[in-house]
Amino acid sequence: MALQPRCQSRNSGARRIALSKNRAQVIRGLKARDRIMSSAINYAAGLALLALLAVLAKKRRALDTKGVVAALVVGLTLLATSWIALALMIIFFLSSTALTLFRYKEKERVGAAERKGGRSAAQVLCSGAVPAALVGISLLTPECRAQLLLAAASAIAYANADTWASEIGSLSKSQPFLIVNPSVRVPPGVSGGITMLGEVGAASGSALIALTYFLLTGGNALLAFLLGWAGEVMDAILGAVLQVKYECPRCKVLWDHPVHICGSEAVYLRGSKWMKNEVINLVTELVVVLAALLTSQHL
């Protein structure tokens, strides 16, 4: 009889421990449910935003039909892997589209405007596929996530710098010159041609992405900015050296296409006919990414 109170005390203690464990499990379950609900809400909001941007892109003819599909694939990939990279890509898309549409008629008159149907799937993928792949890889290598995100930000900074350089530079009052030979003047829109206004635009475009990256992550904005701007310069050099160049026999100017804007058939001069602008963009983007990954290891 003397042992009964002690047994009751032990049973009571065991019940308290069991209740405490059950309570902890319930709390963990509620927290897990809240995380799932929060993720679902965020994902739904992201889907709605991507759908809205797709509709606007098609309506404003910023992208053609295949371009919209490609943009949705890139956007959904980023939504599922990195909202930071998605935010950077959206800023790139919105700012570049706004500049593309700005004073469009003026650019069209000189042959420097983006085609009326909008950017193609190839153009979209050359800008977005590499950053999407990088953040996808970061899920498999968490220890390299910061470096891969920096590389993705640098690639997007380059894409923005390149677009801003073209769209702003084509409005310059001074005639563009070949980056590899400043004495050679070229019409607006010719690959490898640059203006000082365009280079200011390139620096501004890269800075916008780099600053946003810093505000969202606290990462190395200076490196992202420099690599983005350097990528635009490299793009211009490759365009001047490797891309096909024709000469209009009537106007005596260099041109990127076999028929000049005046309607005359241009004469082939040099360069590779298969080395399109999209190929140059992709090669440059890969170089920027490699430089970002190598440099970030020593910082």
Image: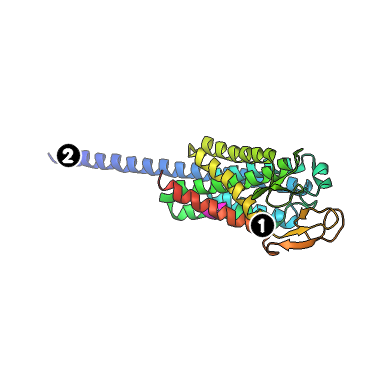
Residue drawn where x is 49% and y is 43% of the image = 35
Closer-to-camera residue (5/66)? 66
Q: Nearer the viewer, residue 120 or 38?
A: 120
- In this picture, residue 63 sits left or right of residue 282: right
The amino acid type, in three-letter code, at marker 1 is Glu
Name the residue rendered at 65%, 37% in the picture: 200
> Residue most toward the left?
2
Q: Position of residue 245 (x, y in %)?
A: 73, 58
Question: Magenta segment range?
Answer: 131-135
**Is 194 on the left-hand or right-hand side of 214?**
right
Looking at the image, is mark 2 or mark 1 earlier in the sequence? 2
Q: Position of residue 52 (x, y in %)?
A: 70, 45
| Amino acid type, residue under disc 2 in the picture | Arg
Quarter of image, res 38: top right
Instruction: Identify the secondary structure beneath mark 1.
Output: helix
Q: Decide: few, some or many residues near mark 1? Use Cα within 10 Å; few <14, some 14-19, many ≥20.
A: some
Residue 150 on image: x %, y %: 50, 45
**Which label is found at residue 278?**
1
x, y percentage for residue 99? 72, 41
Residue, x 51% and y 38% (percent of image)?
222
Mark 2 residue crowding within 10 angstroms, few (<14) / some (14–19) / many (20+): few
Residue 99 in view of the camera: yes
Which quarter of the rendering shows the N terminus?
top left
Mark 2 lies on a secondary structure that is helix
| Residue on which the image places disc 2 | 6
Q: Give the farthest residue toward the right.
A: 263
